[in-house]
Image (cartoon, helix red, strand yellow):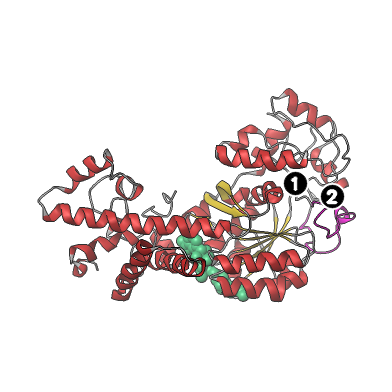
Amino acid sequence: MFQREGDPEHAAQLLGPREAGSGVHGPELSRHARQVHGPGRPVGGQSSGLPLAEAGRRLHGYRPRGRAGHGPAPHRGSAPHRRGHGSRRGHRRRLCFRGREPRAADSRRQSQGQRLRPVDPGQDRSVRLQVPQARLGAVSEKTRLNNDKSRAHEARFVFAGSSTMARIAFIGLGNMGGGMAANQAKAGHDVMAFDLSAAALERAVAAGCQAAGSAAEAVASAEVVITMLPAGPHVRAVYSDQIFKSAPKSALLIDCSTIDVESARAVAGEAAANGFRFADAPVSGGVMAAEAGTLAFMVGCEAVDFADVEMALAPMSRATIHAGEHGTGQAAKICNNMLLGVSMLGTCEAFALAEKLGLAADRFFEIASKSSGQCWSVTSYCPVPGVGPQTPADRGYEGGFATAMMLKDLKLAQDAAAKSGAATPMGAQAEALYALFAANGFGGKDFSAVIELMRGRLGALS
Ligand code: NAD
């Protein structure tokens, strides 16, 4: 799960300045369009029957990309498709293809083996197509089951291979958000971006986003709002002071920051009170995964909203998993990282003891990898240099998942444990040990470097 965070290349980017837009390729519009139109058909162009892009423009005011004569689309202003999509939560709002009728393209997809779900005969709007199976390659079986549940509930169709674009507001363009916003722009979406940092905003513009003067301005006509902010107080303030006051009620709001569960639930409650759909969707994967569009998202939202959340996150994602109701995305994130922190400390202790007992690290690695001590920290992220697959240990513990980030997540876990009354003595011990390690000046080192604390060799770390 943390393979990307463990990429040795990652630390330099995690700790140093991010190079915006380098070699990032989210799912591409042309591939989507080929799935829709079949091989050999022009992207966004004139396929047989009613051209998809033309239909989208007529029905929803969407602008087709990549065709001559189309300048930048205005981000604001009323869009025809919003008519009839009121703020009532009972009337489910759709991210794409709202109001679209079944047509010739649908039977084409069926003939190409892309199964469609049965249409609810009573509905004449919000028709949605099933995600083509090819698009689901990276999505887990569990995700599919969750999708099926929510779709069955709606008796509607979902189509994720869209060649249309959405208006996305992206707030928070730092190490993570910068790459994520760039991938939304690369996927063909119209991204209005905002960050308090002018430098971050400039990088986003260079990567294809449009600059907004404030968060409120960015969200003013957004269909999807994505936030990637440092911590709970930032998220609460941006949503309360700007997003809820300025975004259209039809906008789907997604917070991808790692924050405390309490804040996530408070923002979700406020969103509901204001008539918005909201999801907490923290990520697994570091800066490289953010740039490559291969993050894993754990989502807390109403089941009925999950398909739209998954579709909105697709250009940034290799897997999107529905954790449950609001706040459970954040719960999944901190529980997973607490488990990781504890298992890494146990792994480090075991290797340090093996060394004292005269057991070679590579022998212990081989034995533990095939025995009951096996875990990801041993087999995929071994803290001992030269043992097992390449890890940050092989590069002086540079790169990977910084101790400071692990400590932040462990603190969130302890805070949640205290508030919920859960007993997490191992998590508490992990937090104390990582705090000690960071206090010694190693907050920027990969979290597996804590093995030197166990070995009593902190001086070996530069
Ligand atoms: P970052 O500090 O690099 O970026 C945060 C950005 O938010 C900054 O550019 C900052 O200027 C901006 N910001 C703060 N307040 C704002 C406001 N009111 N309006 C607009 N912009 C504002 O942090 P990051 O590394 O990108 O992490 C973002 C989130 O992702 C954090 O919650 C973090 O825990 C989580 N996360 C990070 C990593 C990682 O490897 N860096 C991995 C997983 C999750």
Q: Is residue 76 magenta?
A: yes
Q: Residues within 10 Å of mark 1 (few under 14, many from 20)?
A: many
The span shown in magenta is 71-92
Residue type, numbered disc 1: Thr
Q: Is residue 148 magenta?
A: no
Contact, CB < 8 Å: mark 2 with mark 1? yes
Q: Residues within 10 Å of mark 2 (few under 14, many from 20)?
A: many
Instruction: Say which residue label 2 marks.
Output: 60
Residue beneath the point at 49% across and 66% down: 416
Q: In front: 118, or 316?
A: 118
Residue beneath the point at 74% across and 63% down: 272
Label 1 SS: loop
Residue type, numbered disc 2: His
Counting residues from the start of the chain, the first of labels 2 and 1 encountered is: 2
Q: Residue 197: which quarter of the image? A: bottom right
Relative to 293, say whether 447 is above or below.
below
Tell how many labels: 2
Residue beneath the point at 23% across and 57% down: 349
Residue 447 got which mark? none
Residue beneath the point at 74% across and 70% down: 244
Label 2 SS: helix
Q: Rounded to the nearest whole Å, what is the CA distance between mark 2 and mark 1?
A: 10 Å
Residue 164 got which mark? 1
Residue 119: give x, y in percent of width and height. Answer: 81, 34
Residue 419: give x, y in percent of width and height. Answer: 51, 69
Visible residue check, residue 197? no
- Report the predominant secondary structure element of the magenta stretch: loop
